[in-house]
Image (spheres, rainbow, N blue to C red):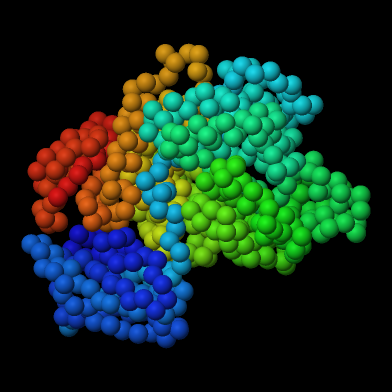
Amino acid sequence: MRLSQPHHDGSELYISNAAPQIGETITLRVRIPHSYSFEQCLVRFYHDGEPRNTPLKLEKKLATESWWSAKVKILNKSTQYRFIFVAPGLYESLNAYGLFDHDVHSNNDFVVVSNKANPSWIRSSVFYQIFPDRFAKSDRNYTLPNWAQHRDWNDFPAGRINTTGTEVYGGDLRGVEEHLDHIEDLGINGIYFTPFFPSRSNHRYDATSFREVDPLLGGDKALFSLVKKAKAKKIHVMADLTSNHCGVGHPWLAKARKNKKSKEHGYFYWDKSVKHGYVGWFGLESLPKLNFSSQPLRNEMYEGRNSIVKQWLRSRYGMSGWRIDVGNMTGRQGEEDHHDEVMHGIRAAMEVVNPDAWLVAENGDFVAKDLDGFGWHGAMNYQGFMRPFWNWMNRNPQITGGFQGLPFAMPKISGKQLVASMNEFNASIPWRSLVSSMTFLDTHDTARFRSVVMGDKAAHEAAIAMSLAYPGVPSIFAGDEIGLEGIFGEDARRTIDWDNKPYWDHTFYASVRHLVRARRKHDAFANGGLRWVAVEENYLAFLRESKKESILFFISRDAVKAKIDLAPLGMTIKENLAGESARGSRISINSKSATYGMWVVE
């Protein structure tokens, strides 16, 4: 990365309005160091598919850099643009992927979308992911259903055996409510629940109803009580929906099997070549695939006045958004592809009942079109954050691929490869989609990050800091803050031992607490852009800059000796926020372990 090159991103410093109306004129700005020489610069954009070029004019000259700008009128829903710099012997294009000295196409252009802005509250939010069966249990009496296998609270999941999905520990929503003070103390202001619908498994991705809370978790009454108390603490609650499939125990399937003329028969794909007679997700009998060529199904799921999507977002139920399970697979089956219609339909339904609700999808393998600004607000950022970051921090290659579905050991990559992966993801979508995507180190489907780094607490703390400093909506899997481990998805779904707090990693908890609060307090993390300052084999540094402040973040994956000179940027350290201490404009770091630093600069 060169500090001597022009920079632009989709944040507030560089674009006057990231959600303009059609017909509105916006200002695009570029930051250009004095060390970068050119004679002419222009912005190349498109009106109705036709290229247009507008010269940039000098707006402001500072000590080490200048700001140049141009005005562009928005005529289309999506406007792509890039910047071109020319001089004798110079012809370079700046797009969302970087600066190139050859002609480039529009696939990696910057994009501004003429559409309602994404929910603003998520910008200053930190979420906490809860797997309901494993977080906390109340003292209420309950009866296990026939499908369930009882497990004592502090037992580890057996994992990878026939009973894996049916091991029930008894966690419930009242248990969550009783421990909201823990979540509040961390500084968390959002909870993302994996499904809480009735089902025949502990993970509940095989819903037998989308209309009620599982009685095993306390039912609707427990949810209402939890949401009321969470709102009083200004904590948002988000639910998880499997739009791709339901469970084999769902009444829809029973009615469909009983009567081929029923509307429910059209909800599914039928296949006589398989024993159970219908298409299941990944061929599984337990997860019947939903067929969105059925208009009645669309009405039931999202279009109808009291559809499932709308029901839970109404004030009575109080959900602040939806996380869509396997969002990239929803609506796709063989030659049929209703994916975009379903995605857009879910978003439209949400805007009817709760325009400020967040829509984020699990896209295990990323499809850029899904985040074009008109579908999901964001995705769970496996592709552009967690996967490459695991590969860079990798201490445990036997943890395969970082939820990549790859049949080999996790690779070890350089800092340059890490940033290239991140930049490629970022360049394929509008900025608004990046900052509306969920940033995390692990989830209920993966190994715990503490196990990824083989118990290295310094590396884990640095990684937590990275996940909170990077653009997006940070999410922490419940238990990470006290050092829980787990080498694969089910093993990671361990319970929290509330009765033996002395065994928690309290030093680590205190660090996470401090970092979460810093993330929520500082405007640069909510509204700042992303400018790379250093990209080396074992360490990275980047700036988050908003109109109000600038923050520099540094991370190393191992022992490091590093020097960063802020003088070419005209910056000096104003305040130490977390990690390594430094002052002045020249930062020197000498650490025998992985480390990080977070500083306000001016």
Snapshot quadrant of residue 119: bottom left
Residue 450 visible in the current orientation: no
- Residue 564 located left or right of residue 44: left
- Residue 207 located left or right of residue 175: right
User: Which of 371/345 is in front?
Assistant: 345
| 502 lies above or below 571 | above
Q: Residue at x 23, y 56 (%)?
A: 547
User: Which of 98/573 is in front?
Assistant: 573
Task: Give how far across and how far down residue 36 sits, in percent.
Answer: 16, 69
Q: Residue at x 67, y 41 (%)?
A: 205
| 502 lies above or below 102 | above
**Residue found farthest to the front:** 316
- Residue 34 located left or right of residue 449: left
Snapshot quadrant of residue 331: bottom right
Q: How many marks?
A: 0
User: Which of 270/448 is in front?
Assistant: 270
Residue 552 visible in the current orientation: yes
- Residue 215 located left or right of residue 34: right
| 486 lies above or below 11 | above
Task: Give how far across and how far down residue 123 sits, in percent.
Answer: 38, 50
| 66 lies above or below 141 | below
Q: Quadrant of the N terminus?
A: bottom left
Q: Residue at x 81, y 49 (%)?
A: 252
Task: Give how far across and how far down residue 54 sits, in percent.
Answer: 28, 83
Task: Give how far across and how far down residue 496 sits, in percent.
Answer: 52, 23
Q: Residue at x 65, y 28 (%)?
A: 218
